[in-house]
Image (cartoon, rainbow, N blue to C red):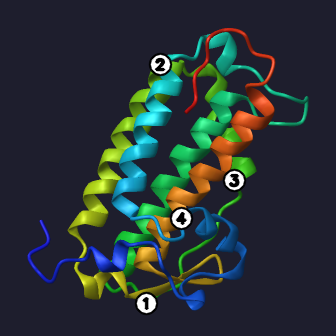
Amino acid sequence: MNTSKNNTDLLSGYLNVDEAGKYYSDYLAYSKGKPLIGQLISSKKSVLNFLSSLSEDDGLYSYDTDKWTVKEVIGHLIDIERIFSYRALAFARGETESLPGYDHNDYVVKANLNSQSVEQLKQQYQSERESVILLFKSFSDEMLMRKGTASNNPFTVRSLGFIIAGHEQHHLKIIRERYLPGRSSGVILD
């Protein structure tokens, strides 16, 4: 674990505007003023409860023909955690090269997520989220403030954690508003 100065203040949820590219400001707004580790733990419980209440048919539901299924949304969240936690690790370790971007739609299509069971996605999500929590707990204050570039955008290490949390909240809001209304199968998302 982190033996340097306690990083609680740096993970409190108040970031400077220059800590991430403008594209990510909406995701960061979800996290403003909320401690990162608490957000990650709380949303982990909500998502795991949601996935436990989800049937295979519910997992294949999409609110429109050109939109992702619930399974694809969950797979996208897992991919983002993997990509952004790698970026955080790389920048914390002093990476100076710009990291490449990715096409999230291509990733979803090529992952063939609808062929995976809800339980498989739940296990992947839980494992990845626990890893992300431990990773961010391990960073010193200095590491959290290190900077790097990915997808032609600047980031601090800590901003990447808040983007993970805010991005998830963004998609959970969409699931609540567009996927769950009218579904009577007992699906729960608090």
Q: Mark 2 points at which residue?
A: 52
The quarter of the picture where the C terminus appears is: top right
Q: Give the x, y percent position of residue 8.
A: 27, 73
Is there CB contact under 8 Å for labels 1 and 2?
no
* Residue 96 image label: 1
Q: Residue at x 49, y 34 (%)?
A: 47
Mark 1 Cα shell of 10 Å, populated few (<14), some (14-19), many (≥20): few
Is there CB contact under 8 Å for labels 3 and 4?
no
- Residue 123 visible within the image: yes
Q: Furthest residue to the right? A: 65
The relative height of residue 112 versus residue 142 in the rendered view (above or below) is above
Element at label 3: helix
Element at label 1: loop
Q: Give the x, y percent position of residue 187.
A: 61, 18
Q: Which of marks 1 and 4 is in front?
A: 4
Q: Residue at x 39, y 29 (%)?
A: 123
Is there CB contact under 8 Å for labels 1 and 3?
no
Q: Furthest residue to the front? A: 33
Among the 4 quarters of the image, the one containing residue 58: top right
* Residue 31 image label: 4
Mark 3 vs mark 4, CA separation in Å: 22 Å
Upstream in sequence: badge 1 or badge 2: 2
Mark 1 vs mark 2, CA separation in Å: 41 Å
The amino acid sitting under disc 3 is His
Upstream in sequence: badge 2 or badge 4: 4
Q: Mark 3 points at which residue?
A: 104
Mark 2 vs mark 4, CA separation in Å: 25 Å
The amino acid sitting under disc 4 is Ser
